[in-house]
Amino acid sequence: MSAVPIALTSGDPSGIGPELAVKAWAALGPALPFFWLGDPRHLPDGVAIAAISDPSEAAAATARGLPVLAHDFPAPARLGQPDPANAQSVIDVIARATGLVRQGKASAICTSPIHKKALKDGAGFGFPGHTEFLAHLAGVGRVVMMLASDTLRVVPVTIHIPLAEVPRALTADLLAETIRITHAGLVRDFGIATPRLAVAGLNPHAGEGGAMGREDMDLITPTLVRLREEGYSLSGPLSADTMFHAAARARYDAAICMYHDQALIPIKTLAFDEGVNVTLGLPFIRTSPDHGTAFDIAGKGVGNPSSLIAALRMAARMAEARG
């Protein structure tokens, strides 16, 4: 395990992020040092806090309480009610964490959930989400979203667009770049020397020889042929309804899916509470729990920390793989 701690961002302070950070610290203790970057006022009352002035103090501070690197926000947290007054500080925390990991003071970033509308309303946030903002901060043009668990890893080629727009958005270049970034991430961040990728078809039965659409024949298959010639281990295009049972999953290290639900339905069925959002293609490690701000249960003490704990553990393993 890396001696350099993980930076955990506060996310939206009106959601479940702060209380889950406390639960994660209670579960992990000194075994996995991380520090919370945010306003201490936003943490639940009565929590043991270990204030630090530098990330290097986090490991020693963990035994005393949740290590907190303070970042002042202009307003207190109103649980369940995102406050646009805090929007810029939420953004600044993400940028600050990025600076720390790029300076080597943090081994990875784990991001708590944000509320995009609140950030847009309060600070004119011009990015669809964390992933695009982090890519901007890193100066990277293209990154890949992976949802990962011990059971399954999936990568959607197209993400948050209407299903009707997927065939137009899906291009040979986009598919090839997604495969290349995924392959490189599995080698660098997961320690898999020769990744095996299973590629889903776009249409039912992978088009069934053109009877159910020609994208699988005309776009996906030629792209896979070209990449196999470059040395990539690829199977597909496969009928997506046969890819996710146990025997099929044993034959690949990650599944490349053509659209959002094709990827997320199987992993949320198999690992709903343990799924982790990983951004591949960044010059640093970023993970996130695979859930939102959950304003409806914020402050009620019922939030499940399993995904956050999995995200922190995965970040630590990825940091170890990178050396």
Image (spheres, rainbow, N blue to C red):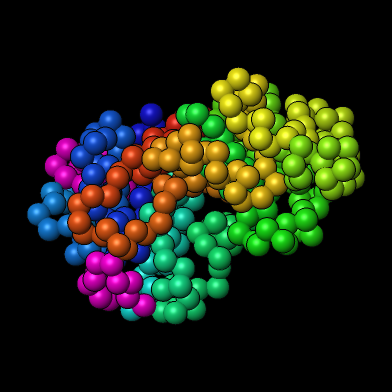
Q: Residue 5: horizontal and vertical position, in percent? A: 35, 41
Residue 24 can be seen in this image: yes
Q: Residue 38: horizontal and vertical position, in percent? A: 29, 60
**Image quadrant assignment for residue 254:** top right
The part of the chain drawn in magenta is 55-84
Point 65% across, 31% down: residue? 243
**Image quadrant assignment for residue 238:** top right
Point 63% across, 45% down: residue? 262
Q: Residue furthest left?
A: 46
Q: As displayed, is residue 267 above or below residue 170?
A: above
Residues 241 and 135: in front is: 241
| Direction from residue 247 to residue 164 in the image, left or right | right
Residue 91 is inside the magenta segment? no
Q: As displayed, is residue 210 above or below residue 293?
A: above
Residue 57 is inside the magenta segment? yes
Q: As displayed, is residue 286 above or below residue 231?
A: below
Q: Residue 297: horizontal and vertical position, in percent? A: 27, 58
Point 46% across, 68% down: residue? 116
Point 70% across, 47% down: residue? 258
